[in-house]
Image (spheres, rainbow, N blue to C red):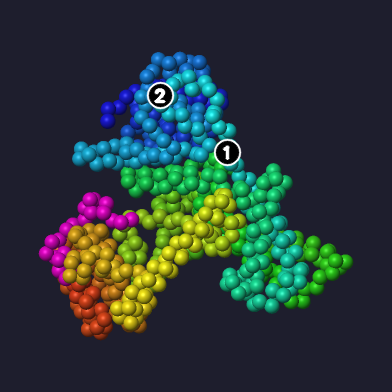
Amino acid sequence: MEHQTVCVAIFDTEECRFGFLDEDVATTLIAVCSEDPADWCELVACWPRYTTRAVPEFASHLPIEISNRDEAIAAIQEADCWIVLDLIQKRFLSSKVFHPITRNACFAMHTDENGKQHDPLSVNFAPWWELREQVDMAIIEQPRQSPMVIPRVDRAVLFGQPLIDDLASRVLAIATSKRGKQAFWWEDPGDCSIRNPFYPLTIEVHREWLMSPRADLGGKYPRQMLHGARDWLSNVVHGHRMRFERSGAPLVALPKDVTGYLDGPIGDEEMALYFSLCRELISAAWHWTQDRFGSNLEVSESSMEPAIDIARLQLTEFLAEVKTSWLANPFEGGSPPAFIIECSRRRVPRGSGLEIVGMSERQSEQHILDCDCPICNMMADGAFGPSFAHIDGHHLELDDEFAFSMLESREDWEAQQQEYADLSAKWEREKRERNESVGDSTGETDADDFESAWNSGGSTNEPFPSSLGGESGNLRLAFLLAEVVGQLQQCSAPDELVQRLNKDFSTYRTSELVDLPDSSRRLSETLETVANQFPELVARAADFQSQLAERLRKPVTNSKDDEDGIPF
């Protein structure tokens, strides 16, 4: 596409700027506004998160002049192609000849000699930004069409002493009640099973904290602080991950001195970890009260009030230590919650072991221990490049409570619940119909819920798919081998045989072309052993051997085109 010169005007609280820029530079400035910069300095600070080979490395090198608003408007009047980035009113405006952007878009900033596109540039405007695209310049002087509502989060309340004080008071209030005393017979108050009498009490304490209005939040309740721009932040983080994966550009964290870091909205991972933090504190509080009082807790309005006041102070001190420890220690074997939350606030994806510009910590390497799955082993070996970790927050939905949902409105949550119910009913109906069909033909029921990996590529007499080269082909074989391993485990096969099968496959997929015949032969011999010991696997073992032989006849080396076919 032929590039054109664009007159770019930037309205700031202190001063205006304008310049005549290349279209790639103008588009990059628009993309930087995805970070919702408050002023020119913040826009410049965020520029390194969006640079490509098509634009200068630093925004300070751009030919943009400081001016007043009248000078900027006059420059626009002389230009056919112009854009306005209004950092004051949070607006993006463009002339009728400037290409459409839309609220969420991705542009390829470089095309090679073969026509292949590279260097993705993502644009994801925050929901409070107003877009007026391809309009007359008279619109510039008009006010916004809609109110500018920007969610601000008071993390000092959500994560600080107010949270601890509230949870401690609620737990002690229940612990000193009759139903609390009845629950104390349970051996482990931290047990999350439904049969645990503490479990509904935990849900109650957590829900009441989230759904109770607070004066220190201006009458809002904590749950409202968790929502407001989750989809926008998810799109921004995904854009930076795609930029790294498709162009090799470094991961750059949002600077800590921009407005969005201090009180900006909460993203998926911060929300998910906030849920887990609350549950951790509530569970620890039950343990503490049980250890202190147990089933001997006596309640007397005249005598217990001083004792409860002392207990509340001690419990809050204990929970503060629990919070500090929980934030600093690995979460589910990975990085500490404090690091994960920091990455979420700084809008950067977490790639295992990858450097993040602007941060000293890195995401911990993902180690897969004692796993016999060939697919997992390939991922652990880095066969598909760096792996990215993400907490999707599915555990927030397990209690079927709107208070914990990642959806903002009750209407959306109720619609989702109905969708889940309809889908579950559909699955049950289809399963029943399959069982009836199988029963009619064979006299048996309980058809498999998941189709065999072999069936996804045709019959066992056909090659599983066309190409067997590179990691793409190895992944396809790994899916087949994973099914074999699963059946071996169901048959209580010796661990040595499963480990030998995985080891031979690992050697096979990492072999150079010259070593492929030997590694293929060893893997085929192990498959022969599997078939001899477990007759029910003869067909699969034989088909796997035939596909190994097919690759030997048509060896294919790793190529970029092949890697692009990986279904990830």
The residue at the point 42 percent across, 32 percent down is: 29
Residue 345 pos. (x, y %): 52, 47
Question: Percent from the top left, x then y, of residue 236?
Answer: 45, 44
Closer to us: 337 or 474: 474
Is 411 left, or right, of 353 in this rendering? right
Instruction: Verify whether residue 430 appears in magenta.
Output: no
Q: Nearer the viewer, mark 1 or mark 2?
A: 2
Using the image, tell me which numbered label, if any, was put on residue 150. 1
Give the residue furthest to the left: 553
Label 1 with label 2: CB-CB less than 8 Å: no
Q: What quarter of the picture does the C terminus occupy?
A: bottom left
Report crowding for label 1: few under 14, some 14 to 19, many 20 or more residues within 10 A (C-alpha).
some
The Cα–Cα distance between marks 1 and 2, rounded to whole angstroms, is 26 Å
Q: Work out whether residue 61 can be spotted.
A: no
Residue at the spot x=40%, y=64% of the render?
367
Q: Which mark is residue 451?
A: none
Tell me the amino acid under the disc marked 1: Ile
Q: Which residues are magenta?
A: 546-568
Residue 106 visible in the displayed image: yes
Secondary structure under badge 1?
loop
Could you tell which of marks 1 and 2 lies nearer the N-terminus? Answer: 2
Q: Check disc 2 and report its element: helix, strand or loop.
A: loop
**Residue drawn at (76%, 69%), measured in percent from left and top?**
177
Horizontal and vertical percent position of residue 268: 51, 52
Mark 2 residue type: Ser
Left or right of 58? Residue 174 is right
Percent position of residue 246, x then y: 32, 46
Going 57% across and 63% down the picture, which residue do you hit? 399
Please say whether residue 560 is one of the residues in the magenta stretch: yes
Q: Which quadrant: the N terminus?
A: top left
**Which residue was labeled with disc 2?**
95
Q: Quadrant of residue 18?
A: top left
